[in-house]
Image (cartoon, grey):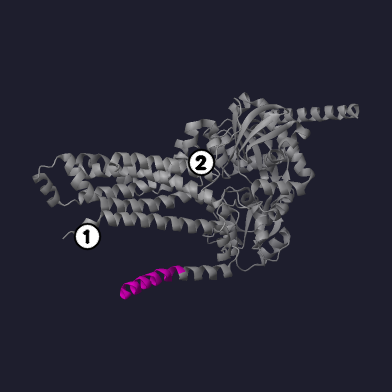
Amino acid sequence: MKKKSLNGLHRLIAGLILPALLLGLWHFASSRSATVVPSLGEVWAVLAHPLRQPPNLDSPSLFACTAISLARVAVGYALAVFSAVPLGLAVGRSDAVRRIVMPLVEFGRPICPIAWMPLAIILFGFSSLGSTLWGDQAWRHDFLGQIQFAMVAIIWWGAFFPILLASVQGVEQTRTLYLEAALMLRATRRQLFRHVILPSALPSILTGLRVGLGLAWMVIIAAEIFPGTRSGLGYMITTSHQVAQYEYAFACILIIGVLGFGMNAALRALSLRVGRWQAKER
Amino acid sequence: MRLDQRQHRIATALAFCLGLALTSGLFGFSTAAIGVGELPVLRVGHVGHDHQIALGVAALKGQAFQADCGVWFQELKPREVYILHERETPLAELHLIKVQGGSAMPAAMERGELDIGLGGVPAVAFFVDRGNDFKILAPLNTDGDMLVMRKNFEAAHWQDFVRLVKQAEKPLIIGYKAPVAVAKLVFERGLMAEGIAFGAPQEQTDTKIRLTNLQGQKNMIPSLASGAVDGFVTNEPAASRAEVIGCGRVVCDLADLPPEGKWRNHPCCCVAARAEAITQHSNILVALLKAIVAATEQINNDKVQAAELASQWTKTPLEVESRSVPHIRYLATPSPEWRRGMTVWIEMMQEMDTFQERFADLEADKVMDRLCDFTLISRAQNELKAERESKEKDKPALE
């Protein structure tokens, strides 16, 4: 029991070493160049008042920016999941689908999502969920009015490929032994897919979901400089750089880090639970 | 009772929608309550800095502006949605859309996302050259470009700067925000006039100034603070911001650079509109221009108040705006100096081969004719004048 708690303490201390070093480095940098690197206190002052509209920054509150970025990521990421997972499963199962889809996937995969920004602007312009529903009166429904399709498309592109490839790999890695055993028990195609292939592919799919989520957060920062954007963590970072109010940029960076950490931890916990059977496998 | 999988999925989707709705209601993304009739909607693009505060002044003053020019803005959503009124008659719903500087505004007009745009003259001219039917309706400002150097660089004005550059053993590194930024173009020609050799950092020539593209205004202050550059050329309010933050010092206004007088009143921002907007909504545009003319007069009459309003509109610290606004010349009428400045730009853009199509081989006067349409601003000025004269006439009768 005592040994267990000591191990926990060691783990905690080990996990805190790098963040403590980073804080020390930050403090040092801030004392050397206070113009560009804000102090810990300045950033804390921003984080401590998340609902307050920044007085010298053309941006909504930190909380509002976080909420809108979360919503944009949620929509783009959900679209990526719902398009990439089924397609990945289909590619993994069918050679014909693979032959049709994979050349285009391999062509598109290395292209950075940000490179598509001009095309996304041309395709979607300023249109958003709000403008689709309410046209010129979208400003009355500001939240949905700010979920612009151009941004969603860029996030989708960022998250799509890792999820797709992980899904393909998951299906491909299904052990022949399981497939043969299920077929011997006269499993139908549907049963085979539902009870053998899908559970077998799930740990790999969840790994893809984790990677995709991280990329979605990376992409949103660049996507939120689209014309007409007035909120979001990426917007706040860019705006605060432009007007040299760097404490807001640092606060946003910390929030993105914490959100990413939390979401990754949740997905990791889920993947450990789903993949528990794999650990027991011999 | 246990939910089956399908019910569970539906419940999750509903919970997500409910969560989204609650979030939007709780944290300020609420729906507005004011209703407007079937007014035309005009989308106005702007960059959101102090070169374009005429629009902000009119919008911030609200109904109080009516007394001055008969036109006023009713706020529906601060800094974003307004109803433009002429006395008691609502004319249009104006959607103010903030876009990035440079070519972002005319590019959005090209795609039909904006009807009216407030932005830089060279960018508008470039887009008209390549076939767009936009017109410059009125100027907004001239000048406002500065040379900023690190704090310990001991130059008080341009001549000092030239002397120190010529004496320096090592070349100075000067940053700019974009290859076609007005500040960079003027600075280069100033150096040429002084006979100072300049070039890009990678050019291994005997240069006294190395010009570096800092890829946007956001990188200027970090570059100066870290010592990566010795100074930069930029437009206001970025120059004043560097002074207020304490990492740089304004050495001179680029309008004062040689050849003597050439850069004074160099055109910067303007009001441009798509041809469809001009033909379909000319009365609305005249009303909007009346507001801009009256706001410009107010800015020029009281720069202290203008700085306060600029700070409020652009969310820039008052200390920055108090330094920046006096560096900018605001105007809404195409004065002879402004027209001369336009000719300088057009010839310079032709020299640089920026114009590839319509304006490539056209004389500057003809380019001006195709690029600008001052009929609406003339109408706005005449109406404003008549209105004020009739008010003056009515005054003794009332007394």
Q: Earlier in the sequence, mark 2 or mark 1?
A: 2
Report the quarter where the N terminus of chain B lies.
Answer: top left
CB of mark 2 within 8 Å of CB of mark 1? no
Give percent across and percent down for residue A80.
36, 44
Chain under callout 1: A
Report which quarter residue B349 is drawn in: top right
Chain under callout 2: A
Residue B130: in sight, yes or no?
no
Which amino acid type corresponds to the residue marked 1 in the rendered image? Ala
Report which quarter residue B96 is drawn in: top right
**In the rendered view, would you say A163 is above or below B362?**
below
Q: Residue furthest left?
A: A184
**Left or right placement of residue B354 versus residue B305 in this view:** left
**Does residue B361 show up magenta in the picture?**
no
Which amino acid type corresponds to the residue marked 2 in the rendered image? Phe
Identify the residue under disc 2.
Answer: A143
Seen at 65% across and 56% down, the residue is B241
Give percent across and percent down for residue A168.
25, 47
For the record, the magenta segment spans A1-19
Please give the label number shown on residue B128. none
Seen at 80% across and 28% down, the residue is B387
Identify the residue under disc 1.
Answer: A279
Mark 1 lies on a secondary structure that is helix
Q: CA distance from mark 2 to mark 1?
A: 44 Å
Report the quarter where the C terminus of chain B lies.
Answer: top right
